[in-house]
Image: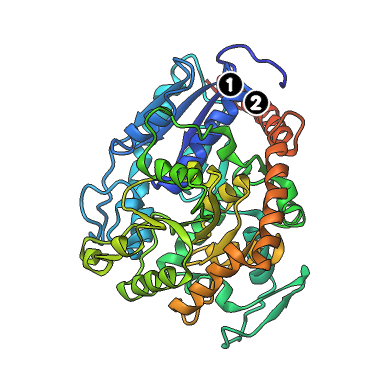
Amino acid sequence: MGKPHSPKSLHIALFPFMSKGHTIPLLHLTKLIHNHRPHATFTVFTTPANEPFISSSLSTLSPNTVTIISLPFSALNNDGIIPPGIESTDQLPSMSLFHSFAFSTKNLQPHFETALENIKKGNNPITFLISDAFLYWTQESASKFNLLRLVFYGMSSYVHAICGAVFGNKLFSGVEDGDLTIQVPDFPWISVKKHDFDSFFHLNDPQDPRVDFLIKVQTATSMSFGTVVNSFVELEQPFVHYVNSNLLRKSWCVGPLCLAQNPTLESPEKPPYWIEWLDKNMANQDQKNPILYIAFGSQAEISSEQLKEIMTGLEDSKAGFLWALRIKPSQQKVVEGFEEKVKERGLVVKEWVGQREILEHESVQGFLSHCGWNSTIETICAGVPILAWPMMADQHLNSKMVAEEIGVGLRVEIVDGFVKWDGLSKMVKVLMEGEMGKVVRKKVKELSEVAKKSVEEGGSSWSNVETLLNETLEMGKTKIIDIKEEN
């Protein structure tokens, strides 16, 4: 491995944004750094309701390696629209409340700075801080305590690069037609439409809270030491180069971070029933059926009308499937009877599932996904092709990357934000049985091997972790010396 360091020479503070999709990769990063520097210590900042999940996730690390500090938090702010007791976006009744919640995290800042002051008085000073991009205000705190800050972005370099090129060149200025195709000057092989971008990307009123939030995040990032990206260079090389050359001060691709976590079950003698169902499918030689895994993330809001179309489309496709279904209590009647109809070839799971375990299962041969970046990188690692159905944020560009840039998936037919049952059924058949499905399946399996090699010793991501740690350790030491001289 890399240059050894004495115990307590490397102390890393981490502050994940309060959302499972943002927290899990940072916890994987903690384990990854621990693999590189077994003597490093970590302090993870969070809130009381999120502490148990973080504690459980990091329980496999060596004793005395991790300290978790829970900061008192209330999402109540001036608008008062967030229900009390909510400490994660996963609990929000609607994603329309996201920006109110994100701004309310600034209520944590005084408690965060008190904790930093207490650590400063101890004998194990923080070498550097890694905090989520959405926690923009931690940059102010880091500067106040002379701490080097790295920003964790839960997006690909492709999304950063395309957004930078499109909006930097004002490609959509004066464009009204959302389906008009425009070539990207910095990437002439790529053409984009306004509909490839979430609606908030097109806002320009600085008083709009969505614009204000984006500006605060970008400003704080520009003041940081650099960004950490959950990707590997080989996956998106021209976009990594563009980001490093044109947009950010420094960027390190250190992923896929999910590979730092072994997907093996903790209690393999008692696997969950959905794994048993997949095992049974593999064991049935007469009716062995390739399985389509279906999941749209923890924050997708699917209408009852759309649910009906999905169910009809799955029935018509005749494909085997495992659907991790998240619905509102009011939608229970909509799906009533569906499980009975499809029980011979489909399973509906209405609770949390181990997604990576499912994707790694031999019987799973496709993934109908919202194309959140975590899900995209996990399915690439598992060598499972994607049927992309983007719904919000960066997912539209991720699906474009998946289908057009790296060729590991196909896209569903979306008209005015809606997917009809016949279009869904057709594309499920194409992915699971058709020639195009075979092509993308071959490509994703090739990329899966590249992903695994990138995190092995000497691989691109392995080397980037070493470079990042060595650079930040030296910079962190310099800052610690400066603090001591000031005192």
- Which residue is labeled 1 in the image? 10
At a point 48% along the width and 21% down the height, the residue shown is: 61
Q: Within 10 angstroms of label 2, few (less than 14), some, or many (20 or more) residues?
A: some
Residue 10 versus residue 301: which sits nearer the camera? Answer: 301
Residue 443 versus residue 269: which sits nearer the camera? Answer: 269
Where does the image place residue 152, in percent across and percent down from the top left? 55, 44
Q: Disc 2 on helix, strand or loop?
A: helix
Q: Within 10 angstroms of label 1, few (less than 14), some, or many (20 or more) residues?
A: many
Q: Where, by quadrant of the figure, is residue 69 drawn?
A: top left
Which numbered disc flags the more N-terminal residue, 1 or 2? Answer: 1
Q: Is 192 left, or right, of 260 in this rendering?
A: right
Q: What whole-number distance in Å separates the C-alpha atoms at marks 1 and 2? A: 7 Å
Visible residue check, residue 434: yes
Q: Amino acid at mark 2?
A: Leu
Q: Disc 1 on helix, strand or loop?
A: loop
Check the image and report above or below for 144 versus 180. Answer: above
Q: Is 224 left, or right, of 114 in this rendering?
A: right
At a point 53% along the width and 59% down the height, the residue shown is: 371
